[in-house]
Image: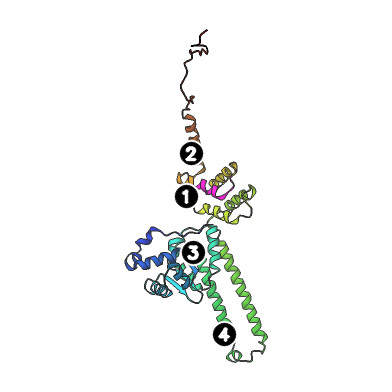
Amino acid sequence: MAKYRMVRTEFWKNPIVSEEMTPEDKYFYLYLLTNPQTTQIGIYRITKKQMAFDLGYSIESVASLMERFTRQHKLIRYNPQTRELAIKNWGKDNLHKGGKPVMDCILSELKEVEDHSLIQYVSESIDKRDISSLYESFYQQKEMNQEDQDESDTDFTESEKFDDPFSRRNPIGGQKEKQKENEKEKQQKTLYTDIENLLHTNQSQEDVKEIIEFWDTNGFGLANINAKEQLLAWLEDSRFLQPKAVILKAMNIACANNKRRLNYIVGILRNWENESLLTVEEIDSFHEGQKSLTKKLPTTESFPSGRAIPGEFKLDLTAGEES
């Protein structure tokens, strides 16, 4: 699947960009927003050496730019231990639409982040509530784990902390630790249940099920999970007023033409969007009108090429010959 990043025209209207940044700053900021290491969540792992190589700068120049963006512009944070970089306004500029494919992608990428404080940093600029809740659930989980660790540390007395490392813990302390581990597991299960519920808040499960069943039973490819996710994104990220019905109609057309491919279906959907045909009724009416127009067009008669021979002309093959 092709990977791309979108930079909105509002980028150039940002006062920080237009008034405070040098040309070099603008170039560096565009690189941070669009380089191949970027992710859907606005947090990604990258080294200064890699940035220097991509930009054609020295590592010292990259370090200076990152210092300026961290302290002066306050647009990024960087963890030198984990090599993770977070972009402050990523959520405001990029995370406007949800849907299961998008939420699944965000969930999988959040699981890879080591520094959870960066998740909190990016979440502060996310306007869409279900996405910001997904971010919050991750750094709140980190806080709960830290609290459990702190409480576990208080179970040791000063003498126990410096006691013989081979000495056994008393059974009461072991029971407390086991209880806390069980509680922690319950909290984590509850947390991940909440996360999974967030993935299904924006679209009907019946709509998803119907589209997937049509895909699987009509030869589009059972194992093509990526294509299914891209198609399901049209349920949430399209202008159609009847997204499920319109998607199924496009799939029926693909079957009728023996073009069981995602790009063929997407091409149909994009054409309908471009024509502002947002319901099945509008689509049917449009195509009926096209058929009627084709029938009314005058037919053009074909004439043989070359010079026409008069009908009354008779060819005499003996003309001009002496008898």
Looking at the picture, tell me which residue is in the foreground, 305 or 4. Answer: 305
Q: Which residue is mark 1?
A: 239
Amino acid type for the residue under numbered disc 3: Pro
**Which structural element holds mark 2?**
helix
Q: Nearer the viewer, mark 1 or mark 3?
A: 3
Question: In 3D space, how far apart are the residues under numbered discs 2 and 3 (Cα atoms)?
Answer: 42 Å
Callout 3–callout 4 Cβ contact below 8 Å: no
Q: Residue at x 43, y 61 (%)?
A: 93
**Can you tell which quarter of the image residue 187 is in?**
bottom right
Q: Is residue 29 magenta?
A: no
Furthest toward the front, the residue is 322
Quadrant in which the N terminus appears: bottom right
Amino acid type for the residue under numbered disc 4: Thr
**Can you tell which quarter of the image residue 27 is in?**
bottom left
Residue range corresponding to the magenta coloring: 259-269
Q: Residue at x 56, y 65 (%)?
A: 108
Callout 2–callout 1 Cβ contact below 8 Å: no
Amino acid type for the residue under numbered disc 2: Phe
Q: Residues within 10 Å of mark 4 (few under 14, many from 20)?
A: few
Q: Residue at x 56, y 55 (%)?
A: 229
Q: Residues within 10 Å of mark 1 (few under 14, many from 20)?
A: some
Principal SS element in the magenta part?
A: helix
